Image (cartoon, helix red, strand yellow):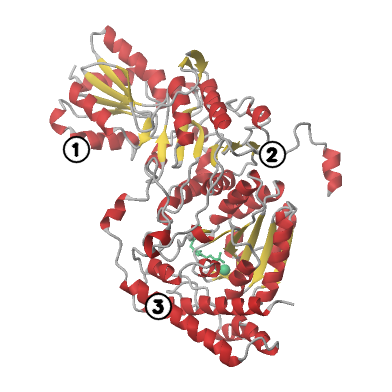
Amino acid sequence: MSELSYRDALNQALNEEMSRDANVFLMGEEVARYNGAYKVSQGLLDKFGSARVVDAPISELGFAGLGVGAAMVGLRPVIEMMTWNFAILAMDQIVNNAAKLRHMSGGQLRCPIVFRGPGGAGGRLSSQHSQALEAHYVHCPGLKVVAPATPADAKGLLKSAIRDDNPIVFIEGELLYGVKGDVPDGEHLVPIGKADIKRPGDQVTIITWSRMLLWYVNEAAQKLADQGISAEVLDLRTLRPLDEEAILTSVRKTNRVVIVEEGWPLASVGATLTDLIQREAFDDLDAPVQRVTGLDINMSYAANLEAATQPSVERIIAAVNQVLYR
Amino acid sequence: MHSPELLLRMYRKMVLLRKFEERAGQAYGLKKIQGFCHLYIGQEAVAVGTHEALRPDDYMLTGYRDHAHPLARGADPGMLMAELFGKATGYSKGKGGSMHLFDIEHHFYGGYGIVGGQIPLAAGMAFASRYRNEDRVTVCFFGDAAANQGAFHETLNMAAKWKLPVIYVCENNRYGMGTDIRRVSAEPEIAKRAIGYNMRGESVDGMDVLKVFELVKECAIDCRKGRGPVLIEAHTYRFRGHSMSDAATYRSKEEVEEERKSDPIPKLRDEIVLRKIADDAKLDAIDAEVKKECEEAVAFAEASFEPGLEELQHDTWVAPGEADQRPRERVRGVKVEWPSYPSGDQLKVSWELEPKAGHLSVVKEGAKR
Ligand SMILES: Cc1ncc(C[n+]2csc(CCOP(=O)(O)OP(=O)(O)O)c2C)c(N)n1
Ligand SMILES: [Mg+2]
């Protein structure tokens, strides 16, 4: 076990997987000589050379598709998107090709590729650079979507993603790179599709993922504990496929649910979770499910507007009070 | 001089492509085939000339006008037709249909329905060949209209910069659906665009199978030697509408009649007769054989079952340990060769995509051009 930043945990995962398997290569903007826009690929060019750590031109659609083509014939590309905002330009290759190759070919082809990079608000960047877009990909059959919150999960999930034979959308938290935590050394694999109880509790379940956990949910849960309320915090970690069993088990224990997500409220992951819970655990619910989301507006630059657009500890506590009828 | 065997093989293949498409068109009229269905009639010289110039293990892929290319590569006509019919015996078990044919056994990597979407894939396949130090080339077909996609620009830039062994063949049939390509292209001569990527650009009479063959053969040699990608513009023409639902009112009857005069099949036939490689009787016999083969393909498709509903559970994700589907093994019960790749510890990557270090000197770079 070592204390590592989220960034270094990802770096370790890449380093270990690239050492283990020469079919793995990393391509993206600024990943090689610049060592990564967020320094996730620090040192990898020197170690693995310029065919395995490739600086791409600013052609998201082009190099995403290049990665898909390489995956179709046996390589295992890791395609870094400088941020997921820019991956919108690559969505055709991710959604129309990567996600559909297995299907269109009737099982003749597989597409073992990881698209990874930071998502969510980056801090004072306004609307085009502050979006939590996971719902776009969660919508699509054929993709798996992963969004780790902690350094340990970041490492373990990236290693699993690289070994998976399906296309993976791996969304890191833009503000999480500097966060530190204990990370198991060497072979540490976190299974894709498994949620994790980050804090056990029995009066209310707070479901969340990625940065919301560390920025708001942990603090809200602690404040609630100080008031004598025991909240269970469930970190989904994988958004597709959903760990329905873990979600429903927790709901059946606490009977009350608050979902916290950074993204917009309409057609979101939280909306889908709400649907799942009311269908599968209606009789276990003691209150309607409450959701705390980013506001249904575009992100502003001004510090106060930016903060007020996102979920907050106060809004989470208010939602918990609502489901507890306090 | 081209060998008699080659000419006869090309002739047979072009006739096969033509007759297969005629049968597909008929079946469409009978609603046996539905959805979008894009026939290749008129363009046969491009697929056949290209295929014959390649090695069987070279990679090939194209857009949605994709019945001809796998046929040229040697795919099973009955199983292709079954795919068009939406049957379980099709190459993709009826999941892909006309626009998404895949025959990996014959290194045909698909038909893609998003205009230009296959262009980056081809660069990635060529990247993989280079990465593994294989001397394989990838050939990617696309239409004239696809050359106006961003994917074209983004990919050709990367392919040329990294000297990827890929041949891009633009099948310029003068129209993207109903739009004359000259109406929407500032530079309608697509081969010229290669200059902007510092890569080799060639244009060829796509109605002449031998000219296509010669050019692709020569470009493939270049490509295998690591000299980088090539953009070929093959001037061709589709005799039918864009898809089965297109009455093609945007072009004149006279224009189509004029273009039909350069039909690639009679052209090759004349050459074969002129060179006394075969007489009309022998060529008619080939025609009859191929006709029978296509009738059998239709009968096979007709007699096959629809996929079982349990198929809904398959082919969205790959389960751990799940093998790939080998269509001819599944349908015909024959053992087929399937691509295999070196494992992660066998593979040694020796390719240096960029010089190890150092800054690019502005002066030096400029002087190169
Ligand atoms: C991205 C995208 N836009 C539009 C379409 C609809 N569409 C299908 S084929 C086509 C014309 C393409 O023409 P071209 O590239 O010249 O190929 P051709 O059909 O002539 O072989 C269009 C507009 C599509 N499939 N994909
Ligand atoms: Mg066209």
Task: Identify which residue is drawn at 55% across, 57% down.
Answer: B116
Q: Is mark 2 within 8 Å of ligand 1?
A: no
Distance between the alpha carbons at the discs numbered 3 and 1: 51 Å
Query: Badge 2 local density, few (<14 within 10 Å), some, or many (20+)?
Result: some
Q: Distance between the residues labelled 2 and 3?
A: 49 Å
Amino acid type, label 1? Arg
Question: Residue B245 or B113: which is nearer the viewer?
Answer: B113
Residue topped by disc 3: B296
Q: B221 left or right of B35?
A: right
Q: Residue at 26% of width from left, 57% of height from top?
A: B309
What SS does tag 1 mark? Answer: helix
Query: Residue A310 occupies which quadrant of the picture?
Result: top left
Question: Which one is in front, B148 or B232?
Answer: B232
Circles 2 and 3: CB atoms closer than 8 Å: no
Task: Write down which quadrant ligand 2 falls in.
Answer: bottom right
Residue A5: x and y, percent? 52, 18
Which of the labelled discs sits on residue A279, or is there none? 1
Is residue A84 something that shows in the picture? Answer: no
Chain designation of label 3: B
Q: Nearer the viewer, mark 3 or mark 1?
A: 3
Q: Is residue B332 left or right of residue B356?
A: left
Same chain assignment for discs 2 and 3: yes
Percent position of residue B334, x then y:
42, 62
Viewer-nearest residue: A269 or B322: B322
- Residue carrying label 2: B350
Judged from this view, the residue extending furthest toward the front is: B335
Name the residue furthest left.
Answer: A283
Provide the chain ID for the residue under circle 2.
Answer: B
Relative to B268, residue A72 above or below: above
Callout 3: SS: helix
Labels 2 and 1 in the same subunit: no
